[in-house]
């Protein structure tokens, strides 16, 4: 580590990369990989996935004329090498920090980021739109979608493949397959076949044969079947051929010569092409190779041995949920846990190990996850869907039509509610209170601490209808967690501090901030706990005894919990002053979580200033 670089400092943009000889590219890959390890060790971020695409990223920018040719990355947590090679090397120390570069591609950040992402499985659809646009304008621009094998589990990816295969747009889809090791068939013979199948000689022979044999349909059909049989024996591409793509691969994604040769050949071909590339997560860095999941998303670490430099503080809400899930499953054999490819992130590891037959990772398929849960509930089982707030948005129709409309007892444990710091707006759970509270039949809660989270999870689980508990990323205030699973009385708020004139109605994670502010101005603080049903009796009591009512939530103000309170106060003809504090009508950029909250007025100081203004 920390060896001087000779090639990487000379590459600020891809056109300089293309001046290198092919023989220099492996050396550049080694330097790029080492630079990235050193950089992410200081900033934290995604590492394993980025280490796996170093050679592929170099080859793509070497062969394709970016930014005129478009590279559309899926998910985006594999784009650090891309950022480094496209003018942002000197900014990598600002990665995921306020005012710095984002952890995902952003159109506002660089002309090389042609499509902004953060969610999965969008690349093929977006790239197809760009390819069709190039076709309509008469441009010879090439468009490439780079999608991981995990993202291929989503229905949207297959919808796009189905559409793209029926068109003649010049689109290349690269499947970055990093879920398997480089097996024997991805060796010299397979790499040779990929070069052959992507070459002009083969494609010219193929088209010539189609023209000659076209006058004799049975012979042409026999020839096509024979070709498919031969290719099918050597490659797993039959499915993609059926979609209308010319399938090539699999090839070794760390063999620079094979990558460059194959991509150069494919760039000359017309129509939809599909290249299967096999890579290894964490490639080239032993700690990440051994534990790719651990290094998927990391904080600061020692680059020499991979040891974390982040001290663990307390118990996170995610851990509270994970422990509750195991405890409840021990009591009730009907509990089934479902996650859309977020086992570790949602705290399901212990459950998956203890109850493997009751654990379902459905892949990056949020829509399917919800309707699958609905089917389980129809037959008397008790599904718990563990999902991030931002990913639940992707299955909104299923939530309404397949679950709420039928009033099925499906429980949602909604993680990463509110702002999420360094991951930025693509991963923020800024809207769930708004988009959930408008749905009939749903029970909606937000805990203020770890113990309340456990009790709300129990309440939701026993509810005979759709229910949701939304909790933030990270740790709570450090409350003592009761082991019992008794739950709460539905729809009941609680007064946590009795004051005068001003009342702060707090939802979820904002309680401690409200208490800090109230202690300095003798305000009343109500822990609302339930967003739906709202405790209208408590609101009426507060309205009768206070002149100013302020709602506080870590959710967008538009249609959120504060809006619900204002609707209730309107029905009461409340004559006092009201104000709602929450997230503004804007996407909040990545940065330090506390600073982000402060900028939105969600701090004790901000609330105190507001109280002084209103009184």
Image: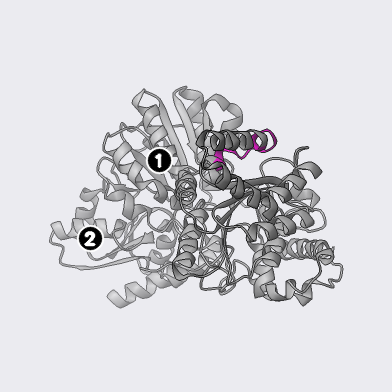
Q: Position of residue 267 (x, y in %)?
A: 64, 61
Q: Is residue 489 visible?
A: no
Q: Is residue 46 left or right of residue 581?
A: right
Marked residue nearer the N-terminal end (1 or 2) = 1
Q: Is residue 129 left or right of residue 435?
A: right
Figure quadrant of residue 355: top right
Instruction: Say what secondary structure mark 1 lies in.
Output: helix
Against 93, residue 131 (above or below) is above
Q: Position of residue 192 (x, y in %)?
A: 77, 47
Number of disc labels: 2
Q: Nearer the viewer, residue 492 or 92?
A: 92
Q: Which residues are magenta?
A: 231-241
Q: Nearer the viewer, residue 74 or 547?
A: 74
Q: Position of residue 410 (x, y in %)?
A: 37, 35
- Residue that carries the numbered disc 2 in the rendered image: 566
Neighbour tally class for label 2: few under 14, some 14-19, many 20 plus, Cα within 10 Å: some
Against 115, residue 287 (above or below) is above
Instruction: Say what secondary structure mark 2 lies in.
Output: helix
236 within the magenta span: yes
Name the image quarter holding the N terminus: bottom right
Figure quadrant of residue 250: top right
Marks 1/2: CA–CA distance: 24 Å
Against 378, residue 16 (above or below) is below
Name the residue at 44% across, 23% down.
334
Q: Nearer the viewer, residue 109 or 596?
A: 109
Q: Is residue 262 left or right of residue 408?
A: right
- The numbered mark at residue 456 is 1
222 within the magenta span: no
Q: Is residue 8 left or right of residue 571?
A: right
């Amino acid at each position: 580590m920390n060896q001087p670089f000779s090639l990487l400092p000379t590459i600020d943009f891809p056109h300089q990369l293309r001046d290198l000889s092919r023989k220099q590219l492996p050396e550049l890959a080694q330097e790029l990989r080492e630079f990235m390890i050193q950089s992410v060790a200081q900033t934290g971020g995604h590492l394993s996935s980025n280490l796996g695409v170093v050679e592929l990223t170099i080859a793509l920018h070497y062969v394709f004329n970016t930014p005129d040719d478009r590279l559309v990355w899926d998910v985006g947590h594999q784009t650090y090498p891309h950022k480094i090679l496209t003018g942002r090397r000197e900014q990598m120390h600002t990665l995921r920090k306020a005012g710095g570069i984002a952890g995902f591609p952003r159109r506002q950040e660089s002309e090389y980021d042609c499509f902004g992402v953060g969610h999965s499985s969008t690349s093929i659809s977006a790239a197809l739109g760009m390819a069709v646009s190039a076709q309509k304008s008469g441009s010879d621009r090439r468009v490439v979608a780079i999608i991981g094998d995990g993202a291929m589990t989503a229905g949207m990816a297959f919808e796009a493949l189905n559409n793209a295969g029926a068109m003649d747009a010049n689109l290349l889809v690269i499947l970055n397959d990093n879920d398997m090791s480089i097996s024997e068939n991805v060796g010299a013979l397979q790499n040779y076949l990929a070069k052959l199948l992507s070459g002009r000689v083969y494609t010219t022979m193929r088209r010539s044969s189609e023209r000659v044999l076209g006058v004799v349909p049975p012979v042409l059909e026999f020839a096509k079947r024979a070709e498919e049989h031969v290719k099918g024996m050597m490659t797993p591409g039959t499915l993609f051929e059926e979609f209308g793509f010319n399938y090539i691969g699999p090839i070794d994604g760390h063999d620079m010569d094979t990558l460059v040769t194959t991509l150069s050949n494919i760039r000359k071909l017309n129509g939809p092409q599909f290249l299967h590339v096999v890579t290894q997560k964490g490639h080239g860095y032993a700690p990440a190779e051994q534990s790719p999941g651990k290094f998927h998303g990391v904080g600061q670490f020692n680059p020499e041995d991979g040891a974390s430099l982040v001290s663990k503080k307390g118990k996170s809400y995610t851990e509270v949920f994970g422990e509750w899930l195991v405890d409840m499953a021990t009591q009730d054999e009907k509990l089934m846990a479902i996650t859309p490819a977020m086992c570790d992130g949602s705290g399901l590891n212990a459950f998956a190990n203890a109850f493997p037959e009751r654990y379902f990772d459905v892949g990056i398929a949020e829509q399917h996850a919800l309707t699958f849960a609905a089917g389980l509930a129809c037959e008397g089982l008790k599904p718990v869907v563990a999902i991030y707030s931002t990913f639940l948005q992707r299955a909104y129709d299923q939530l309404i039509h397949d679950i709420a409309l039928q009033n099925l007892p499906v429980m949602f444990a909604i993680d990463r509610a509110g702002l999420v710091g360094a991951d930025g707006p693509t991963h923020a759970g800024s809207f769930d209170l708004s988009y959930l509270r408008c749905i009939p039949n749903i029970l909606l809660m937000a805990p203020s601490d770890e113990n309340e989270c456990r009790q709300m999870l129990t309440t939701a689980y026993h509810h005979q209808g759709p229910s949701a508990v939304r909790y933030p990323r990270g740790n709570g205030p450090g409350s003592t967690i009761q082991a019992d699973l008794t739950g709460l009385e539905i729809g009941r708020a609680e007064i946590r501090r009795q004051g005068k004139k001003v009342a702060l109605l707090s939802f979820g994670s904002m309680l401690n901030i409200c208490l800090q502010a109230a202690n300095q101005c003798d305000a009343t603080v109500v822990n609302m706990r339930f967003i739906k049903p709202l405790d209208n009796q408590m609101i009426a009591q507060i309205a009768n005894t206070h002149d100013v009512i302020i709602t506080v939530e870590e959710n967008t103000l538009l249609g959120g919990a504060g809006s619900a309170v204002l609707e209730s106060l309107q029905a009461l003809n409340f004559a006092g002053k009201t104000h709602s504090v929450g997230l503004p009508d804007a996407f909040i950029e990545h940065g330090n979580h506390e600073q982000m909250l402060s900028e939105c007025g969600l701090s004790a100081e901000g609330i105190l200033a507001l109280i002084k203004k209103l009184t």
